[in-house]
Amino acid sequence: MKRILKRRVLIPVFIIVFGLIQFKTIDKVNMVVPAEFGILTIETPPKEVGELISAACFDCHSNTTKYPWYSNIAPVSWWMKKHVEKGREKLNFSKWSDYSEEKRDSLRLKSAELIEKKWMPIISYKIIHPEAQLDEDQRELLISWMKK
């Protein structure tokens, strides 16, 4: 009997709380940075490399994040926003011109290392974004370009 009462109370409370947290939305505005400041313009990678960087890296590591439908649902939206902010803080391909030559070299090598270890793109992103899943040839292409 107590168990049924708990469910009758907890389920509506959960629904109300879940509904209320939907009002705490995230800011999805991408800061506009002219393309000439980005990695694709400054480094001019081969077309395939540029497409791979765009598909596998840009949503978290540039100012061109494409927020999917589930980014409208709290608390997933909060996690996503924090993840994108952290990604941009570590590396922002849209602001490539802001980095010194030494910093660019360091970021390229670190990126190559993370791709090589299959830590990037992260698993949770690859599950939802199949276009970001890199096969061995694509991974090798990106790694060799990043190490150039």
Image (cartoon, rainbow, N blue to C red):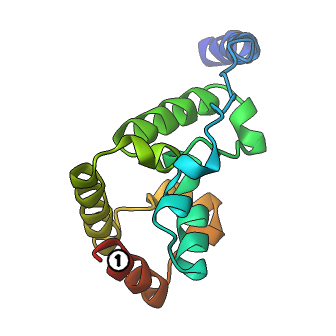
Q: In this view, does 15 lie above or below 43?
A: above
Q: Of 32 and 129, which appears nearest the observer?
A: 32
Q: Is residue 55 above or below residue 17?
A: below
Residue sitting nearer the eye, 103 or 135: 103
Q: What residue appears at the point 30 percent right and 55 percent down from the top-left corner?
A: 104
The answer to which image quadrant residue 71 occupies is top right
Numbered disc 1: secondary structure: helix
The residue at the point 43 percent across, 87 percent down is 136
> Would you say 27 lies left or right of 123 here?
right
Residue 95 in the image: x percent, y percent?
A: 47, 43
Find disc 1 in the rendering and name its residue: 143
Residue 104 in the figure: left or right of residue 127 = left
Quarter of the image for residue 40 reads bottom right
Query: Crowdedness of circle 1 by 10 Å Cα count: few (<14), some, many (20+)?
Result: many
Viewport quadrant of the C terminus: bottom left
Name the residue at 25% across, 49% down. 103
Q: Which amino acid does label 1 sit on?
A: Ile
Relative vertical location of residue 53 with respect to residue 14 in this rendering, above or below: below
- Which x, y percent locates residue 56? 54, 64
Residue 23 location (% of width, % of height): 74, 12
Q: Which quadrant of the rendered structure holds the N terminus?
A: top right
